[in-house]
């Protein structure tokens, strides 16, 4: 079995520089050369996973096929590589300590004092190597969250230091991402923050092999020489990472800087072939040269932090490119929508998406948005709570079930059209206990959903505790709101669509989590197409 080679990506100076995008872009280039690549993220926070984190804290919680609640960077990895990730692709400090403490309680350490070194760092390294030991991958890229110098990151940085001699020559590459800021008063780029960041890394025992420098302006050759000299990195391994128009430009920019070639050289890997990225360039061509444009309203409760809906935003980008259409997303806070202003707020939209979420805040605004989309025949897409809001609105305003609700919002409602799942009723722990991961769905032929997928059997990812109450299904279907997709094992309603409406679909699952550059999700593709049709017909009528 061939031994995997390892690339470690660290960051310095400031957070949010884009380590995940650099890792994903490098992975894409190596994959395009015929290598098998996976990417993993190690996060320094003590939460066991992001499942219990407020979206305002950490952006969206990304869910994998195997039901792991993970960091949103795993979404970038999948969108770039078009390969599913798993529980093993995201590890936190909390999970490391939890596993070590469980072993200590079980007596696995035979009475030894359990310490950060070697026990915690050994557990971190075991997780570093887990994916590489499967034999599935030529290269494992590991992104270390946070900044070098953070207290929280120290055990991970120490584990990376220990990994170099363990892996041996030509099996280890360290990439350090830093910021080269531009001071307008001085009129020049400054290298000192990068020098200090590398110094921190050196003090931890890690010499970076490659330096990737984020900057607003191009790095001059003199400046590259200066960075090379003071950071002990070969001149051709000082890589420029300019701010890009779109994250999907970054693989092309990194190819121009020959980042993939530098990595392959360090790993002593012969080029299998030049990277085949024609499809990527074709995608960028469609993305940047649209022939149509539409305005989509995203109705949510966390719109102040757009990362809370990162996968939905990127799915719109993919679907827009597929339709050669520019998708302008209008971020609308659900709490600001009332019965008095709903028409004025949503009138200019070509499509309305009601986003997922938890809790009752903003629910009434979402219900007003659903009602407007239903009555005005505007293309509507509801995801998870978005579907549930569509069900509640229909029950109240069409089926005359006044004050119908979800038991999440009102446990005493007379019409619990949305209710907690039976297997969720006795759960007390909040983390990792929802219906999570990929589940089967059977689609009825002759429906819009079947027209979207072209298959009767699909599999989609879930993250929820509440579901459509099938006690009321017959009443809904008699009134034209049909369950067109169900889980074959549990009979759980997965997809509902409204008859006598151009495009009104809600899903209990999260289709945005499976949309990638090479495989835009068909629900988003058809939703954007419906929005284009709606805009065209509205313009013709007017």
Image (cartoon, rainbow, N blue to C red):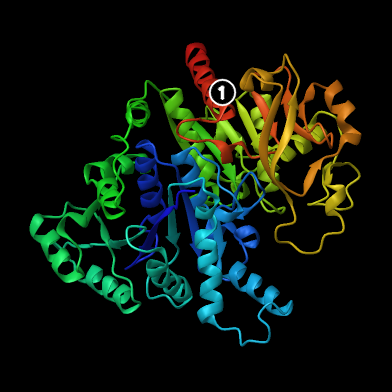
Left or right: 96, with 108 as reference point: left
Q: Position of residue 308 (x, y in %)?
A: 54, 51
Q: Write down the residue under mark 1.
A: 526
Residue at x-position 50% and y-position 30%: 519
Q: Which residue appears farthest toward the top when viewing the image?
A: 540
Residue at x-position 32% and y-position 42%: 251
Q: Which residue appears farthest toward the front when viewing the image?
A: 1
Secondary structure state at the residue bearing disc 1: helix
Establish if 207 lies above or below 88: below
Establish if 98 lies above or below 381: below
Residue at x-position 12% and y-position 65%: 226
Left or right: 62, with 215 as reference point: right
* Residue 71 shows up from this direction: no
Left or right: 467, with 306 as reference point: right
Viewer-proximal residue among 260 and 265: 265
How would you rate the neighbour count of disc 1 (Cα within 10 Å): few for under 14, some for 14-19, many for 20 or more? Answer: many
Viewer-proximal residue among 540 and 457: 457
* Residue 156 shows up from this direction: yes
Q: Position of residue 100 (x, y in %)?
A: 63, 74
Establish if 437 lies above or below 486: below
Quarter residue 206 falls in: bottom left
Viewer-proximal residue among 444 and 155: 155
Q: Position of residue 183 (x, y in %)?
A: 18, 64
Quarter residue 384 falls in: top right
| Mark count | 1
Establish if 540 lies above or below 77: above
Q: Position of residue 417 (x, y in %)?
A: 84, 39
Residue at x-position 49% and y-position 29%: 319
């Amino acid at each position: 079995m061939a031994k995997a080679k390892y690339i470690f990506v660290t960051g310095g100076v400031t957070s949010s520089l884009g380590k995940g995008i650099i890792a994903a872009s490098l992975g894409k280039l190596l994959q395009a050369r015929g290598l098998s690549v996976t990417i993993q993220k190690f996060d320094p926070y003590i939460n066991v996973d992001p499942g219990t984190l407020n979206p305002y804290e950490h952006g969206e919680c990304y869910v994998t096929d195997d039901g792991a609640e993970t960091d949103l960077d795993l979404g970038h990895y999948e969108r770039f590589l078009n390969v599913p990730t798993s529980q093993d692709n995201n590890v936190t400090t909390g999970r490391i300590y939890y596993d070590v403490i469980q072993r200590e309680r079980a007596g696995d350490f035979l009475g030894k004092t359990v310490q950060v070194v070697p026990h915690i760092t050994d557990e971190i390294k075991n997780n570093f190597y887990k994916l590489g030991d499967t034999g599935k991958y030529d290269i494992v890229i590991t992104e270390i969250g946070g900044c070098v110098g953070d207290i929280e990151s120290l055990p991970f940085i120490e584990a990376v230091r220990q990994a170099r001699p363990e892996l041996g020559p030509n099996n280890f590459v360290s990439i350090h991402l830093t910021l080269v800021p531009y001071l307008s008063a001085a009129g020049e780029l400054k290298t000192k923050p990068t020098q200090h960041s590398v110094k921190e890394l050196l003090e931890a025992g890690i010499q970076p092999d490659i330096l990737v420098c984020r900057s607003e302006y191009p790095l001059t050759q003199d400046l590259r020489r200066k960075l090379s000299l003071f950071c002990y990195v070969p001149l051709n391994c000082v890589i420029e990472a300019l701010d890009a128009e779109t994250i999907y430009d970054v693989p092309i920019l990194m190819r121009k800087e020959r980042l993939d070639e530098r990595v392959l050289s360090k790993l002593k890997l012969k080029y299998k072939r030049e990277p085949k990225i024609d499809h990527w360039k074709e995608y960028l061509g469609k993305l940047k040269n649209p022939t149509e444009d539409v305005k989509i309203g995203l109705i949510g409760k966390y719109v102040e932090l757009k990362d809370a809906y990162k996968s939905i935003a990127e799915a719109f980008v993919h679907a827009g490119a597929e339709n050669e259409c520019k998708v302008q997303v209008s971020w609308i806070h659900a709490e600001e929508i009332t019965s008095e202003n709903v028409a004025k707020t949503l009138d200019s939209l070509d499509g309305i998406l009601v986003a997922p979420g938890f809790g009752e805040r903003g629910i009434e605004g979402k219900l007003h948005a659903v009602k407007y989309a239903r009555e005005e025949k505007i293309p509507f897409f509801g995801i998870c709570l978005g579907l549930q809001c569509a069900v509640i609105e229909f029950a109240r305003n069409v089926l005359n079930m006044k004050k119908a609700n979800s038991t999440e919002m009102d446990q005493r409602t007379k019409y619990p059209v949305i209710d907690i799942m039976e297997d969720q009723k006795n759960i007390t722990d909040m983390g990792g206990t929802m219906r999570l991961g990929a589940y089967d769905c059977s689609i009825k032929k002759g429906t819009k959903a079947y027209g979207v997928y072209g298959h009767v059997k699909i599999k989609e990812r879930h993250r929820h505790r509440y579901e459509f109450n099938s006690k009321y299904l017959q009443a809904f279907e008699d009134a034209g709101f049909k369950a067109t997709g169900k889980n074959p094992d549990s009979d759980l309603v997965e997809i509902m669509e409204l008859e006598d409406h151009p495009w009104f679909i809600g899903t209990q699952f999260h289709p945005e989590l499976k949309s990638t550059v090479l495989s835009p999700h068909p629900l988003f593709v058809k939703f954007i197409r419906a929005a284009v049709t709606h805009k065209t017909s509205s313009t013709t009528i007017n």
